[in-house]
């Protein structure tokens, strides 16, 4: 079965500094890959997605992510964070429906981003 | 218009009660889902529903039952509520799968259930 690992539970970054959130997945083929953001008390909003093609993907709010097949990674980056970026970030994979069990996306456990003034 | 809407946003109830959460999507999507987010923010899929095919996560207790009156609605009914059911429940929808793979999910804002 597929799995997603976000090794950092919490990350603290100073406002204006660069950011990288790590995501590794386990799956036998190339999955669809996603990053979602969840602000406090809100639902999940899609930041960006990778289906195929260019491995560097641009998203909303100045975020980008790079798919590296050799490392089974899909890390999220932003060159300069803003206080409004403080939120929970989730990496997710979508895999081929196997016909058994629930499909949908499998999510990592999330990384809580704290922005220091 | 909200793409995926859930009601109620907050629900506080006693153990043993039965409650429902409603979900509607106006995106014309074929597949809808229910996810549970626990206190540690972990998101776990409970159900997916596509063209009247219900796929159940085997770890979900049978006290939970999804009901879909039509393609745009997927409601969640919970019987005999327990303390451990306290969580945020998210409804989501997606377009028909590409090549059998789930595409992007569109989420509702969540329904926070507190069982006392």
Image: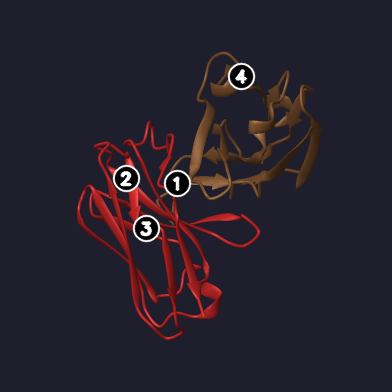
Please give the count of numbered marks on the rendered protein.
4
- Give the mark nearer the N terminus: 4 vs 1: 4
> Residue B99 appears in which quarter of the rendering?
top left
Q: Which mark is residue A62?
A: 4
Q: Crowding at label 2, few (<14), some or many (≥20) Cα neighbours within 10 Å?
A: many
- Chain at tag 3: B
Are discs 2 and 1 both within one chain?
A: no
Q: Nearer the viewer, residue A17 or A49?
A: A17
User: Circle 4 sits in a helix, a strand or a loop, which is it?
Assistant: helix
Q: Position of residue A80 (x, y in %)?
A: 73, 20
Q: In x, y percent, where is residue A13?
A: 80, 33
As drawn, the label of residue B31 is 2
Mark 3 and mark 1 in contact (Cβ < 8 Å)? no
Chain B shade in the render: red
Residue linked to disc 3: B55
Alpha carbons under labels 4 and 3: distance apart: 36 Å
Structural crowding at the residue carrying mark 3, measured as other residues with C-alpha within 10 Å and reported as few (<14), some (14–19) or many (≥20): some
Looking at the image, is mark 3 or mark 2 earlier in the sequence? Answer: 2
Q: Nearer the viewer, residue A81 or A106?
A: A81
Chain A colour as displayed: brown
Residue at 70 percent across and 43 percent down: it is A111
10 Å crowding of disc 1: few (<14), some (14-19), many (20+): many
Callout 1: SS: loop
User: Decide: marks 3, 2 in contact (CB < 8 A)?
Assistant: no
Q: Residue at x 48, y 45 (%)?
A: A43
Element type at mark 3:
strand
Which of the chains bears the disc numbered 4?
A
Q: Quadrant of the C terminus of chain A?
A: top right
Work out how far the residue at label 2 is from the one at label 1, CA to CA, in angstroms: 9 Å
Q: Are marks 2 and 1 in contact (CB under 8 Å)?
A: yes
Nearer to us: label 4 or label 3: 4
The residue identified by callout 1 is A104
């Amino acid at each position: 079965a597929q799995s997603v690992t976000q090794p950092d539970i919490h990350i603290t970054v100073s406002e204006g500094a660069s950011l990288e959130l790590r995501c590794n997945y386990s799956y036998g083929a190339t999955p669809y890959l996603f990053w979602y953001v969840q602000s406090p008390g809100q639902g999940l909003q899609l930041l960006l997605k990778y289906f195929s093609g260019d491995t560097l993907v641009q998203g909303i709010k100045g975020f980008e992510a790079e798919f590296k097949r050799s490392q089974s990674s899909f890390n999220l980056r932003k060159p300069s964070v803003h206080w409004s970026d403080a939120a929970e970030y989730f990496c997710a994979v979508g895999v081929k429906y196997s016909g058994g069990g629930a499909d949908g996306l499998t999510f990592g456990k999330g990384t809580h981003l704290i922005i220091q003034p | 218009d909200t793409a995926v809407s859930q009601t109620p946003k907050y629900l506080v109830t006693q153990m043993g009660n039965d409650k429902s959460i409603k979900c509607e999507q106006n995106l014309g999507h074929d597949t809808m889902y229910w996810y549970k987010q626990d206190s540690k923010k972990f998101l776990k899929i409970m159900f997916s529903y596509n063209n009247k095919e219900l796929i159940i996560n085997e770890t979900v207790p049978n006290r939970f039952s999804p009901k879909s009156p039509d393609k745009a609605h997927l409601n969640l009914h919970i019987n005999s509520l327990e303390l451990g059911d306290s969580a945020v429940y998210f409804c989501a929808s997606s377009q028909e799968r590409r090549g059998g793979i789930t595409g992007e999910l569109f989420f509702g804002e969540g329904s926070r259930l507190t069982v006392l």
